[in-house]
Each structure stands twice: as structure tokens, then as C-alpha cells.
Image (tube, grey):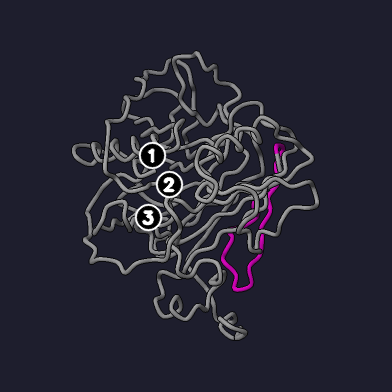
């Protein structure tokens, strides 16, 4: 970009983010700005950056926010979070993606989903995947579709004393630990040590980009090496926008109980943000702002009477081999020219993660 900043006056993009507790949806600004939300559990500063994949000329020119960081890398976007706990979590934190309604899948689509999830589980380990509960089958409170992982699914983390945390808009390369640079085993062990000693007087920075090379949020498409030569309309995969990034714990779930569903009423939310693209906006309009809370949230009617639930435990995923690296454990090498892509009519999103 050099020193020319005249492009900033006209810059806009389709990314929209609405965290629980935010007064209004957040838009990308030409001059990056960190947003912050607070609830009873923590305060969270967050920043999301995305290459302008919807505008080839702008991407080539480098005239977009964070081009110095994103250009010539595999990642299409990056999510940065900075958390200060008001109270340390009581149980394991889950991080991942969820939808707000059940999306039916069948046939080969379901088999492909299971294969992809199985591969992801082998990479990260302790993952939880659910298609969600179908209202036509399950009575009572319904579980939302989700794929969530332990915190070591983040690609990078850093721990700082309060007041010494790095700026989220800055260059974080080399800070803390990175899964790709430090090795999976060392990274997971270090993260486990941090989790065991969460404190209210430290600030925890987390960066996530591993799946971004497969998911173009601007264009609302699944792309890249996850299915070589194919691209999918994200709406056909997840039902409809938005999708939600989420961090939560399950303080009310007995690990020995038969019903291990991640119900909204059982969650203590630390961060939850709706994400969508204005190129494929939500059919019913943008989500409405919600009050900041780390208590359970009503996912569009998913919270209901939890008694007399007819429920079948999830079946294990089938094995898979030879699939590409789903979480970006490979190096973040320069982007290679893409092969011709083929449009796919339908598939299921949450099997991809």
C-alpha cells in the first residue's frame, strides 16, 4: 500500500459481526478499530480482518486493511480475541461454530460430513460435533447444530500481565506460541497449562485462522483444498446466515450423565458473535442486538421445556484418510493459483469443521 491512504475514504466491505452485548453490528473500517464487549464473566476485545476476495482489483492493489498481514498468505481472514476474565471458568471452555437452527442432511452429503469431521477430530482431539435436534423428533429443549473444540483449536495464543497486552491491530508474529511454528504437542501442552491457571489479573490473546483458507466469508462460499476444484454456496451448506463464533463452558453438565448435549440452557457464554456477509444477507434481516450476559441465551426458540426429552445419542463419525489439513496445521505459505472451480448444489456446513 505504501504511504498512499486515499483509498481509505471509499473503503467498504460486506463483512458484518454482531457479538452478544454489542449495541449494533460491527463493520470493517479502513482504519482498523478494536471493538469490546463485557458481560458477567469477562471482557472481550475482538477484531476480524478479511482479504477483499469479492474485489480482485482491490486485493491486487493491496488497498485494504491489514494487507501487510494478509497478502500472499493462504488465510482469507483472521479472528483475534483478547479476554480478561472477571471470574476464572469452572470447567473446560469450548470454542467453535454453531447455527441457530437444525439443518437436515442425508445420503452422500451426510457420509462426506462424517468423514470430514472424523479427520478434524484426529487433528484436534477432543471435539464435539452435533447436527442439532430436529423439532419433528425431539421434544423439549433443542440442541443447536455445532462443531466446537478445545481452546487449542486457536492457531496462536499469548498471555500478558494486565496492562501489558499487545494491541490487536499490531503485528503479533512471534508473540506467545503458534501451533504451526512451535509444533502441535508443545502447543497443546502449553495451552493446557494456561487453561489450568486462568487468572483474573492476566489478559489472554487468541488468534484463529486455520479454517479460513476453506471459507470465504465475504463471498459466503466454501472454497479451497477442503474439496479440490469445488466451491459451495454457504447458504446451501448451513441453511441461512448468520453463523456464530462461540466460546462457552457447561457448568451444569455432569460428565457421567447420558445426555451430554450442549443445550443453550446449560451454557455459560463468554463470547458469542453472529457473522454474515451483506453479499448474502440474512433472509429475515440482520440479527438484533442482545444484552450482554454470560448466562444461557435463547437461540431462536431452542430453549424450551427440557423435561420428557426423546433423544438418541450421536453416532461416531466414520473413518477418513487422505483429506487435506482442515485446521491449517500446514504452513501459511503463499497462495498458489487456483484451479477451475465447480459449483456444488448442496452439502452440510458443520461437517466441514
Mark 2, mark 3: which one is toward the viewer?
2
Report x, y in % for residue 53: 41, 69
Q: Earlier in the sequence, mark 2 or mark 1?
A: 1
Residue found 71% across the figure and 56% down from its top: 166
Residue picked out by circle 1: 120
Specify the quadrant that holds the N terminus: bottom right
- Main structural element of the magenta stretch: helix, strand or loop? loop
Determine whether label 3 and label 1 are within 8 Å by CB: no
Real-space Cα separation, disc 3 to disc 1, in angstroms: 13 Å
| Label 3 element class | helix
* Mark 1: few/some/many CA within 10 Å (<14, 14-19, 20+): many
Residue picked out by circle 3: 214
Stretch in magenta = 22-41
Residue found 25% across the figure and 40% down from its top: 112
Q: Earlier in the sequence, mark 3 or mark 1?
A: 1
Real-space Cα separation, disc 2 to disc 3, in angstroms: 9 Å
Determine whether label 2 and label 1 are within 8 Å by CB: yes
- Residue 327 got which mark? 2
| Label 2 element class | loop
Q: Earlier in the sequence, mark 2 or mark 3?
A: 3
Residue 27 within the segment the image draws in magenta: yes
Amino acid at each position: 500500500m505504501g504511504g498512499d491512504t486515499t483509498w481509505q475514504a471509499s473503503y467498504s466491505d460486506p463483512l458484518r459481526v454482531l457479538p452478544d452485548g454489542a449495541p449494533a453490528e460491527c463493520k470493517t473500517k479502513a482504519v482498523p478499530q478494536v471493538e469490546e464487549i463485557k458481560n458477567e464473566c469477562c471482557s472481550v476485545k475482538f477484531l476480524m480482518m478479511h482479504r477483499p476476495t469479492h474485489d480482485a482489483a482491490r486485493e491486487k492493489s493491496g488497498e485494504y486493511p491489514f494487507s501487510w498481514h494478509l497478502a500472499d498468505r493462504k488465510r482469507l481472514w483472521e479472528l483475534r480475541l483478547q479476554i480478561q476474565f472477571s471470574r476464572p471458568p469452572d470447567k473446560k471452555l469450548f470454542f467453535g461454530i454453531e447455527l441457530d437452527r437444525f439443518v437436515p442432511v442425508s445420503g452422500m452429503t451426510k457420509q462426506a460430513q462424517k468423514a470430514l469431521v472424523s479427520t478434524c477430530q484426529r487433528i484436534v482431539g477432543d471435539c464435539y460435533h452435533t447436527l442439532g435436534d430436529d423439532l419433528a423428533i425431539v421434544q423439549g429443549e433443542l440442541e443447536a447444530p455445532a462443531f466446537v473444540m478445545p481452546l487449542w483449536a486457536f492457531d496462536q495464543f499469548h498471555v500478558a500481565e494486565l496492562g501489558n497486552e499487545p494491541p490487536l491491530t499490531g503485528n503479533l508474529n512471534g508473540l506467545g506460541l503458534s501451533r504451526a511454528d512451535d509444533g502441535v504437542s508443545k502447543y497443546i501442552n502449553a495451552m493446557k497449562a494456561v487453561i489450568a491457571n486462568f487468572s483474573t489479573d492476566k489478559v489472554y490473546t487468541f488468534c484463529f485462522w486455520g479454517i479460513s483458507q476453506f471459507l470465504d466469508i465475504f463471498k459466503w462460499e466454501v472454497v479451497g483444498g477442503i474439496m479440490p476444484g469445488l466451491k459451495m454456496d454457504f447458504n446451501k451448506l448451513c441453511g441461512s446466515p448468520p453463523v456464530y463464533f462461540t466460546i462457552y463452558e457447561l457448568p451444569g453438565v455432569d460428565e457421567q450423565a447420558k445426555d451430554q448435549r450442549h443445550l443453550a440452557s446449560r451454557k455459560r457464554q463468554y463470547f458469542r458473535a453472529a457473522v454474515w456477509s451483506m453479499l448474502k444477507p440474512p433472509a429475515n434481516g440482520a440479527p438484533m442486538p442482545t444484552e450482554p450476559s454470560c448466562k444461557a441465551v435463547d437461540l431462536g426458540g431452542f430453549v424450551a421445556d427440557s423435561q420428557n426429552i426423546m433423544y438418541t445419542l450421536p453416532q461416531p463419525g466414520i473413518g477418513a484418510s487422505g483429506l487435506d489439513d482442515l485446521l491449517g496445521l500446514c504452513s501459511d505459505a503463499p497462495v498458489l493459483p487456483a484451479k477451475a472451480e465447480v459449483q456444488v448444489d448442496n452439502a452440510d456446513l458443520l461437517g466441514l469443521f
